[in-house]
Every structure is written in structure tokens, then in C-alpha cells.
Image (spheres, grey):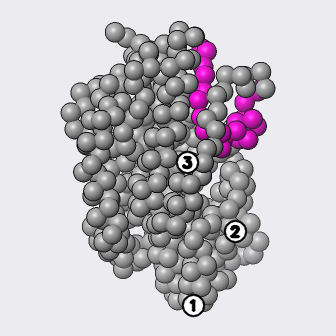
């Protein structure tokens, strides 16, 4: 199968490392213009969710306008059968990828997310107003830029995303989870925890993700404080892999709770480094309150690690009682208590950890392995070519 790639120039270094030199002439880069740089600088001054609307959408549409011109030429010159637009993942964001001379497939998309009802206060009044305006005006934008209405196929990750699509979309819709796992990186290699150097029982948890408020790492730290105050016959350690604007506040919280002996902040690490830490841990823990996907959940499952996560968004799509523990976000206090209880439950039962881990690995091998997903997407491409 012949393939061409049209991407922004910011991905050049990564693609140079990932793709053979002989195929580099099939990649077309959209340059980083003064428009891109100006919007990026403006977005840095805004809260993340507001920036994604105020500057993120205009930046993407400008990039896609430039991409569309390249795609039209490629289709005409190479008799291309299908054009696949995998980003943005937002179901409401309009698309300019239409009228390019070939059927267009858009997705997989994943969105339509809100905070759990008990955590609505995490979203400021200004954010709620702006987001509601954005969702309301998206219908008009999708009428003016009808890429999703003209697409041959729309791919959605779940029913939540399907419901968030623009109105009057009569295109065929197929459900396909956007995340997968590279089993060459996330290997099923059992390694002894690096804490198991004494006769005392120990368990090591790991969190992987950005240090931002919606990841709710502060809930984890409060749960650890509860466990530290109890008489337990095991030792708990938490590795926090990631960086972000909340890191300093979380470090202060750990110090205030006097749990620094249980927590280690590692900052940003490469995918390979994260895989090493995950292999050495006993379980992944993800308290996120606004997670559309959650690829880290799948990566942990691939390495036969049980997962404790909030029963909301992407993790709730991936996990079930056979491979993890999902905690309902009914209130902050109940979630803190729930994570403390779940961590203690896994710490006290090696057999439970093993059983959940094996089930997670089995699920990855049958559903989420990238090799399987490649076959799925090729089948979808064939559907896209049908008249």
C-alpha cells in the first residue's frame, strides 16, 4: 500500500527518527508560520481548556487549510483512493478536508467529555461559559466548513463521542477506539519491585501523566496520607512520572502531609523510561477526572499490571472488574477513601494483582494490539473506497 503523510513541521525530528530515509520523500511538512507562532504564544497565557478553543481551533484550521491544498495535489498526481484525517480528535471541531478528489475518513474521534457532577467546581465560571459557547457555535462552524458532513466515514471511540458529533451528520459512523499499544515497547516482562530488598512486604504504584489539576494527583497524595496514618504490615511507594504546572504545588502538599518518604517525583521521562518504571511497579494508578482516552491504562495492562482508576471517561471504557478497580467519583472525600482502600486491597493480595494483571494482558492481545488495529483500519479503508 502506497501512503503519503501531510503533517506540521514541528513533527519533523520525530518522524526523521521513526521513518526510513527512503520514505522521507512521501512526507510533506506544513511550515511553522508567524500565524502559528502568534497563536501559540497567546495560548500559553490562557488556561488549557480555554486555549484549546480560543487559539487551538484557529491554529488547526489554518494548518488544515494549508494541508488541504497539498492533499488536493497529491490526490490528483497519484490517484489516491482514500484520505484519512486522524486529528483533531474533537467530535465538534469542524473539518476543511472535503472536496479533495477522494473519499475522506475522519477519526477516530474522542470527546464530549465533562467533569463528573461532583467535581463541576473544577471548571471555572468563565471556562463553562466559553466552552458552552464553543459547543453551541460548533454547529454553525460545521455547516460553514462541512468536512464531517461530506466525509465517507466517521470513526468514534465510544457512544459519548457519537452523541457529541455535529447535528445533521448522515455519514456512516463506525466505533473504533483511537488508542492502542505497541507490544514491542510495553512488554509483558515481570520484574521484581526495586523495593523488595527487605523482609517487609512492599508495593509500588506508579502514576504517568501531566501534572495538571484535572489529573487529580492531589487525591492520590491524600489517599497515601490515610494509609501512612494506619498500622499496616506493608510499605507503599508511589512514583510520579510527568511534569506540569501543578508539580510544585503537589510537592508542597506531599511535604505538608509528611509523606515524602512514600512519594518520588521524577519529572518528564521518555516512553522507554516510563516502560522501565512500569515494569518495576506492582500497579498503575490514575485518578484523572477528565480523561477522554488514557493510553497509560492500556500500557499498564499490556505489561500485566492491574490498574486503579476513576470510573469516568476513557479508563471506564478500557477497564472492567476483571482487570482493574474503578472508583466512582461521587465526591472528593469518597474518592480519596476509595483510592486508599483500593491501594490497600492490592497491597494485601498478590493473587489479586496477578489475576487482574493477566486479564488485562489478555484483553490487550485480543483488542488493543496495534497489529490488530492496523488490520481494522485497513478494513475501514476498503469500506471508504466502496461506492
Q: Position of residue 104 (x, y in %)?
A: 42, 23
Above or below for 260 versus 82: below
Kindly identify which residue carries mark 2: 266
Above or below for 292 versus 215: above
Kindly identify which residue carries mark 1: 256
Mark 1 or mark 3, whichever is nearer to me? 3
Along the polypeptide, which appears first: circle 2 or circle 3? 3
Indicate whether residue 13 is drawn in magenta. Answer: yes
Identify the residue at image location x=60%, y=52%: 37
Q: In which quarter of the image is the N terminus?
A: top right
Along the polypeptide, which appears first: circle 1 or circle 3? 3
Q: Quadrant of the C terminus?
A: top left
**Res 57 seen here:** yes
- Residue 98 location, quadrant: top left
Identify the residue at image location x=32%, y=25%: 150
> SS class of the residue under badge 3?
helix
Identify the residue at image location x=63%, y=43%: 32
Q: How crowded is mark 3: few (under 14 residues within 10 Å), some or many (20 or more)?
A: few
Question: Disc number at residue 319?
Answer: none
Question: Disc number at residue 35?
Answer: 3
Q: How crowded is mark 2: few (under 14 residues within 10 Å), some or many (20 or more)?
A: few
- Residue 163 location, quadrant: top left
**Magenta-highlighted residues:** 1-20
Above or below for 317 versus 239: above
Front residue of 166/134: it is: 134
Amino acid at each position: 500500500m502506497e501512503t503519503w503523510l501531510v503533517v506540521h513541521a514541528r513533527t519533523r525530528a520525530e518522524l526523521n527518527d521513526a521513518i526510513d530515509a527512503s520514505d522521507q520523500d512521501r512526507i510533506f511538512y506544513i511550515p511553522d508560520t508567524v500565524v502559528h507562532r502568534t497563536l501559540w504564544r497567546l495560548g500559553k497565557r490562557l488556561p488549557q481548556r480555554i486555549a484549546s478553543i480560543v487559539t487551538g481551533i484557529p491554529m488547526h484550521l489554518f494548518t488544515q487549510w494549508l494541508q488541504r491544498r497539498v492533499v488536493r495535489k497529491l490526490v490528483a498526481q497519484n490517484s489516491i483512493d482514500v484520505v484519512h484525517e486522524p486529528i483533531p480528535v474533537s467530535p465538534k471541531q469542524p473539518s476543511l478536508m472535503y472536496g479533495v478528489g477522494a473519499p475522506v475518513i475522519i477519526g477516530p474521534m474522542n470527546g464530549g467529555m465533562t467533569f463528573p457532577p461532583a467535581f463541576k467546581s473544577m471548571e471555572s465560571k468563565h471556562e463553562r461559559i466559553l466552552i458552552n459557547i464553543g459547543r453551541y457555535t460548533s454547529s454553525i462552524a460545521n455547516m460553514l466548513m462541512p468536512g464531517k458532513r461530506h466525509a465517507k466515514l466517521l470513526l468514534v471511540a465510544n457512544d459519548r463521542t457519537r452523541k457529541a458529533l455535529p447535528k445533521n451528520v448522515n455519514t456512516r459512523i463506525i466505533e473504533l477506539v483511537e488508542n492502542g499499544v505497541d507490544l514491542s515497547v510495553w512488554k509483558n516482562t515481570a520484574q521484581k519491585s526495586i523495593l523488595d530488598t527487605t523482609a517487609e512486604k512492599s508495593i509500588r504504584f506508579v502514576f504517568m501523566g501531566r501534572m495538571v489539576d484535572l489529573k487529580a494527583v492531589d487525591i492520590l497524595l491524600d489517599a497515601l496520607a490515610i494509609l501512612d496514618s494506619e498500622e499496616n504490615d506493608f510499605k507503599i511507594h508511589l512514583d510520579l512520572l510527568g511534569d506540569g504546572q501543578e508539580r510544585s504545588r503537589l510537592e508542597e502538599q506531599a511535604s505538608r502531609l509528611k509523606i515524602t518518604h512514600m512519594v518520588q517525583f521524577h519529572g518528564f521521562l521518555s516512553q522507554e523510561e516510563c516502560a522501565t518504571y512500569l515494569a518495576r511497579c506492582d500497579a498503575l494508578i490514575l485518578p484523572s477526572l477528565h480523561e477522554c482516552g488514557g493510553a497509560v491504562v492500556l500500557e499498564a495492562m499490556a505489561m500485566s499490571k492491574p490498574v486503579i482508576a476513576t470510573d469516568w471517561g476513557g479508563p471506564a471504557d478500557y477497564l472492567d472488574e476483571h482487570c482493574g478497580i474503578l472508583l466512582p467519583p461521587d465526591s472528593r472525600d469518597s474518592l480519596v477513601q476509595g483510592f486508599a482502600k483500593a491501594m490497600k486491597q492490592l497491597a494485601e493480595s498478590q493473587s489479586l494483582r496477578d489475576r487482574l494483571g493477566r486479564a488485562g494482558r489478555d484483553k490487550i492481545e485480543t483488542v488493543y494490539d496495534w497489529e490488530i488495529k492496523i488490520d481494522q483500519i485497513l478494513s475501514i479503508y476498503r469500506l471508504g473506497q466502496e461506492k
